Image: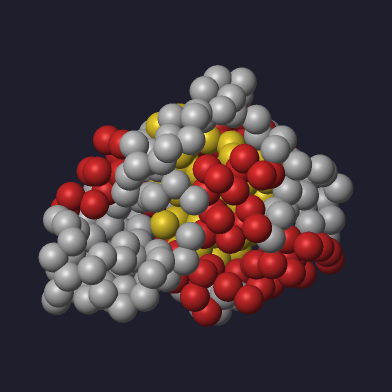
Amino acid sequence: MTEESNYRTDVTPIWCPGCGVFSLLSSLTKTVLPNLGIPNHRTLVVSGIGCSSRIPGYVDTYGFNSLHGRAVVIAQGAKLASPDLTVLAIGGDGDFFSIGAGHLPHAVRRNVNITCVMVNNFVYALTKGQTSPTTPYLQRGEGPFLSLKYYPPVDPILDMVSYSVSTKASFIAQGIATDPSHLAWLLEEAIKHKGFSFVSVLAPCVTFNPPGLFNTIRERATYLKEGEPVELPDSWTEQPWLHDSSNITLALKLAQSPIAEKPHIGIMFRGNER
């Protein structure tokens, strides 16, 4: 029996070939849970509704596929009832930052020791391609990602990382689905952190996203390394600073970097534990 089989059910995922959620599932079952040595019966994965919310069916731990937007609430309740459980809440950008957005600041201020993993594929994928709170907003004719059929200019995006920084989550990180080993490291650090942890996972939706969107994000992504200069967008005039994940003011600046111009990958902020 392999380590992965200890954390994978025999249920076959039904995501589209090339979906970024495969990377998250692989990171969890092949690396994160085996490395941390967390027993299956001491782990709970809670999800809402969406493509990424199918994950509890594929991870051989306790799992709860709950209501749309309510994964964080249920995860908090489970942790408070059973403090020894390792609890993850997993969902998408629509799940956590639309119907579920009101729950996040309260989870942050309570600093409950759970890990919130948001798979950001910039679209409502399960319900067939509607714009989500993180869908790139472009004026008509403003670049290659605009599709008047699937991406009409409606509202500016809700920046999930800025939101997490401004509400002072005690651990904030951003990974990318095309780098599963680095993503696994981020998830391990998030789970080990004693407090509310938020990890955004940039992921492609191969069915509904414009083809160039995720390719551009992947090509322009830059990794944060503690104590080393931060790469800033070309449109910014200020001088780069040395990355300091303990500085929430600098983390907020990083979070405001346009996602399609200079996405930052790594630990943005690591604050006080419980």
Q: Is residue 128 above or below residue 80?
A: below
Seen at 52% across and 35% down, the residue is: 266
The x and y percentages for residue 258 are: 39, 50
The x and y percentages for residue 265 are: 47, 37
Q: How many marks?
A: 0
Q: Is residue 103 above or below residue 29?
A: below
In this view of the protein, which residue sits in the foreground, 167 or 172? 167
The x and y percentages for residue 245 are: 65, 34
Seen at 55% across and 45% down, the residue is: 253
* Residue sticking out furthest to the top: 228
Seen at 24% across and 43% down, the residue is: 216
Say whether residue 50 is left or right of residue 208: right
In this view of the protein, which residue sits in the foreground, 179 or 30? 179
Quadrant of res 167: bottom right
**Residue 220 seen in render:** yes
* Residue sticking out furthest to the front: 237
Quadrant of res 226: top right
The x and y percentages for residue 184 are: 52, 35
In this view of the protein, which residue sits in the foreground, 106 or 22? 106
Seen at 56% across and 28% down, the residue is: 241
Q: Is residue 208 above or below residue 248?
A: below
**Residue 59 seen in render:** no
Q: What is the image's colouring?
A: secondary structure
